[in-house]
Amino acid sequence: MIDSSSTLVEIGARLKQERERSGMNQSDFGVVGGVKRGSQLEYESGKRPFDIQYLLRLTEVGVDGYFILTGKRQAPSHDERSAHLLRAFAAMGPVDQAAMLRLACTLGGWRHLPPLLAFRAQPR
């Protein structure tokens, strides 16, 4: 049988670790999760369980919900990392995109740049 009080304490401790990893204080973290500081304090101390909506809101800003629930870190899948990289790349202007592609090709060990990257940006 699972001891729910010790499980809540363990989950609360991991929740606190994730909050600290994010660099937020309890008030700000609570705002992200849609709760007040007092509720956040109770969650972290294991005095009260949180609901799934709270956890989902936290995961939307990069909090590792899997770690909070299980204590195990999951490395992002290749597809997930690629998606993050593509979103960041899409947000860049064309000059920055070209620079990033040149950097990626260089770091990846490519000896010759693809024709797309052979151009030089005009000075502003």
Image (cartoon, grey):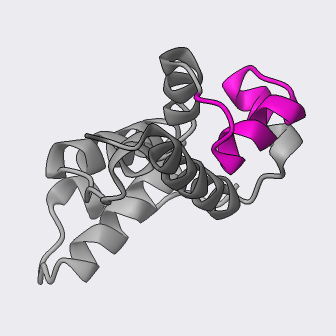
Q: Position of residue 59 (x, y in %)?
A: 49, 34
**Residue at x-position 64% and y-position 61%:** 123
Query: Which of the 4 image quarters holds residue 1?
Result: top left
**Quadrant including the C terminus:** bottom right
Q: Is 48 within the magenta? A: yes
State the image coordinates of residue 54 (x, y, percent, origin top left): 59, 23
Q: Reply above or below: 4 against 16.
A: above
Picture mark count? 0
- Depth check, front residue: 23 or 66: 66
Q: Position of residue 89 (x, y in %)?
A: 42, 45
Q: Name the residue located 59 percent from the left edge and 57 percent from the top edge.
A: 13
Vertical comparison of 105 with 79: above or below: below
Question: Is 111 displayed left or right of 120 in the figure?
Answer: left
| Residue 111 image position (x, y, % from top left) | 12, 83
> Is 32 placed above or below 1 here?
above
Say if 123 sits above or below 103 in the image. Answer: above
At 41% from the left and 62% from the top, the residue drawn is 100
Range of the magenta residues? 29-49
49, 62: nearer the viewer: 49
Q: Quadrant of residue 48?
A: top right
Identity of the residue furthest to the front in this view: 1
